[in-house]
Image (cartoon, grey):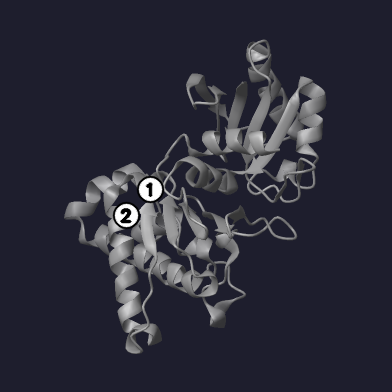
Amino acid sequence: MKLLTFDVGGTEIKYAVADEKMNFTDKGYVPTPMDTFEQFSDVIYGIYEKHKDEVEGIAMCLPGFIDVKNGRCNGGGGLLYNHGTDVGKLLQERCGCKIVLENDAKAAILAEYYRGSLKGCENAAVFIIGTGVGGGLIIDSKIVRGTHFRAGEFSFVITKADQYDQKDAVMAESCSTRAMLINYAKKCGSEELISGREFFKRLPDDPLAEEAFDELCTNIAVQIYNLSWLLDLEKIAIGGGISQQPIVTERIREKFAEVISKSSAGHMNLPMHIQIVPCAFYNDANLIGAFINYTLN
């Protein structure tokens, strides 16, 4: 079986033809349309038309609260034109083939659970660190979607109880790559944001970059600590482009150990046995997860 797989992001749409062994061919990417669903549909159909004779259907992951069974996007994430839209149905009518949708972070945890670093876990999670903080949960060996398909949307978790009405009081503004880069720019007295790649080039020799990185990892470690008590997880896998830097998972582990030692759990000598690991898949994680989701539906 071959499928055309799509990973729809806020800036670009990655795609590839994939088989069951996750061999990818004809990989590519195009800019994500930002204005209308019609433009989005045109882009998807244009890519599908080139491959329609070799694929059985389309497996897609995208931002938002995705109703997998009905192919409906109940919240569009950064792509507002998808909000409240029957994306799957409309694309299926346009392309004339089976189309199965999944949330992008849920696709990542499917890839890690079935083929990657979370394989064999009964209770686990992924933190996808990027512009915001995507997430996915596996509980009792099943992916958790929630009543309104919002389970694992860590970006919206409030982190400052006394400032809950402020925009920066949520995980997206303290635990994301973007948050780190904004923090670094402020420390430098600049309004210009550098790229993540440039940040990690500067990190070894720049004390301000080290401060911003340390604060990010501490914030993430605190939320892992909270999640550990709520769900008693075996593993948490760290994903997103930032996770390709080995120092990221290493520093989060260090900060997590600090959080435990200074917390009430540490004072009471309560053990916390949770592994923090990098995701096994990087740029291909969502494409792999979208394929797996198609086979499950």
On residue 248, which mark appears?
Answer: 2
Res 186 seen here: no
Q: Left or right: 79 with respect to 138?
A: right
Q: Residues within 10 Å of mark 2 (few under 14, many from 20)?
A: some
Q: Counting residues from the N terminus, which is met first, the one under dot 1 or under dot 2?
A: 1
On residue 242, which mark appears?
Answer: 1
Residue 51 to residue 280: above or below: above
* Count of marks placed on residues: 2
On residue 195, which mark appears?
Answer: none
The quarter in which the C terminus is drawn is top right
Mark 1 lies on a secondary structure that is helix
Disc 1 residue type (three-letter): Ile
* Quadrant in which residue 13 is drawn: top right
Residue positioned 34% across, 44% down in the render: 244
Check whether the beta carbons of the residues at disc 1 and disc 2 lie within 8 A of each other: yes
Residue 239, given in percent of the width and then of the height, sits at 43, 49
